[in-house]
Amino acid sequence: MTIRVRQVAAACALGAALTACGAPSAPHAGRPAPSAPSAAMSRPPTLAPGPAGLTPVFKNGPRVGGKTVALTFDADMTADEGPRAAKGEHFDNPQLISTLRTLKVPATVFMTGRWADEYPAEARAIGRDPQFEIANHSYSHYAFTGDCYGLPTVAPDRMKADVERAYTAFKKAGVPNAMPYFRFPGGCYDRQALKTLSAVGVTAVQWDVVSGDAFATDSDAVAQQVLDGVKPGSVVVMHCTRSAAPATERAVRMVVPELRKKGYRFVKVSELIGATGRHR
């Protein structure tokens, strides 16, 4: 049975941008053990494996128990986009990270290993800032299924290695505690992908609100789409890529005060996953 995320027009834009432009008691072999010994960081919350031991999939937190929302940002860069970066294309967005810090908004950044290789100082700064958490978005940003918005495809026998290579890139960049969460490139996955990644010990993280920031130039429209979609426990997918999501930073500056006026509290994905476990 194929499980595939399809988000009509907004997701088509998201998928296009993705081609251009995130624990158990004992750590699994595929994910490096956190370098800090604190109990909080050594055992971040994860979901229990699904049926037949498949990688669990998380889309949103509890709808009850408080108005929380997680803003997530995909730091996308594919394995073959180095020449574009060398010519001056910006796959990072330091102004967005600065704005999140200024607004005191916790966030989860789903980062590709290739992005961490290109911007190690930025990856390290984000990873060492307690306001943020870094999660895995694969190394190559190639799709884990066929027919995923035109993305190149990772062979099934290379999927596990691609995820593990991203964790290695984070460690090389100086990220001390990358989270055991994984976001499929393009949001595309099937049973085979979930089965293959079960050995890595990650929770797959999707979303329930598409911001529409991919290639968008209208920050007002992006902000309105987020405000219209957010519910308690929502996970919002946005991007941390200047070249492919130039409207995101301004949209965030509009979204944050409006959601706070409505009583929402911003949290990281780890808090939503932890709350999900408590409400079961």
Image: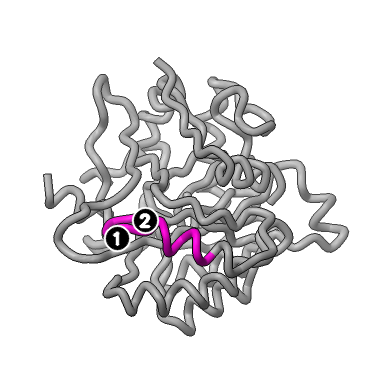
Question: Where does the N terminus fall, quadrant-wise?
Answer: top left
Q: Is residue 10 left or right of residue 78?
A: left
Q: Is residue 139 left or right of residue 19?
A: left
Q: Tell me residue 105's x, y (percent).
A: 41, 74
Of residue 22 and residue 64, the one placed in the foreground of this image is 64
Residues tagged 2 and 1 counted as in contact (Cβ below 8 A): yes
Of residue 263 and residue 96, the one placed in the foreground of this image is 263
Residue type pointed to by label 1:
Met
Q: Tell me residue 83's x, y (percent).
A: 84, 50
Q: Nearer the viewer, mark 2 or mark 1?
A: 1
Calculate the distance from the C-alpha at mark 2 to the C-alpha at mark 1.
7 Å
Residue type pointed to by label 2:
Pro
At x 87%, y 59%, the residue is 87
Q: Quadrant of residue 216?
A: bottom right
The residue beneath circle 1 is: 41
Q: Is residue 120 visible?
A: yes
| Dot 2 crowding, Cα within 10 Å, few <14, some 14–19, many 20+ | some
Q: Residue furthest top?
A: 1
Question: Where does the C terminus fall, quadrant-wise?
Answer: top left
Of residue 130 and residue 194, the one placed in the foreground of this image is 194
Residue numbers of the magenta segment: 223-234
The residue beneath circle 2 is: 34
